[in-house]
Image (cartoon, helix red, strand yellow):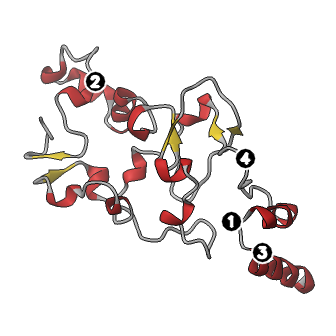
Amino acid sequence: MLPFLMLVFLVGYFSGCSTPKNYKILSFFFDGVPNPVSEPAVLAADTVDQPVAAGESPQVLVQNTATKIQPHPPYHDRQCGSCHDQSVMGKLLKPLPELCYQCHEDFDTKYKALHGPVGGGQCNMCHSPHMSANQHLLTRTEKALCLYCHDPITVLNDSYHADANDIDCIVCHNPHGGENRNLLR
């Protein structure tokens, strides 16, 4: 067992995981090494709306799908090193939301009240870090995303939401924060 582990360590150490010439070596020993010369895999339409926990990878990948996929620019441009530590597979350069705030607006200082996931630094509860079939890299469509965490019966039975069946939540609520705890626009 020890010689095998030494071999795996040496292969990983000397080949790295981001160059085309080393892809054949790494993919021989490890499943799931992304091919640096092919197009990035896209999520199948039936997996895009599934939640992906931090550090977990999607279960189903396909090369082509009829769904229009919105890629995150660094992922699309194969700039993995702008978010990930290239020496430790899968490790982020900075914790969330600090990593996101390198390029995106810092909501911590913009609003008095923050939406729970924003305040908790969990951008990936609502946004996919790589790609999505939804606008703004959302993990679900807008209303489905809100009602995934907020109880639909409680929300829709509230007198303020009596006529809101066909309206997206973000028409009235800011999804990131606001001046009060209801995050009204």
Q: State the separation of the CA atoms marked 2 and 3.
A: 49 Å
Q: Residue at x 51, y 57 (%)?
A: 54
> Sequence-wise, which precedes: disc 2 or disc 4?
4
Q: Residue at x 75, y 81 (%)?
A: 13
Location of residue 8 with respect to 77 vertically, above or below: below
Residue 152 located left or right of residue 92: left
**What residue did someone put label 2 on?**
168
What is the x, y in percent for residue 112? 10, 54
> Sequence-wise, which precedes: disc 2 or disc 1?
1
**What residue did someone put label 1 on?**
18
**What residue did someone put label 3 on?**
15
Please tell me the numbered disc located at residue 112. Answer: none
Amino acid marked by disc 1:
Ser
**What residue did someone put label 4 on?**
38
Amino acid marked by disc 2:
Asp
Quadrant of res 145? top left
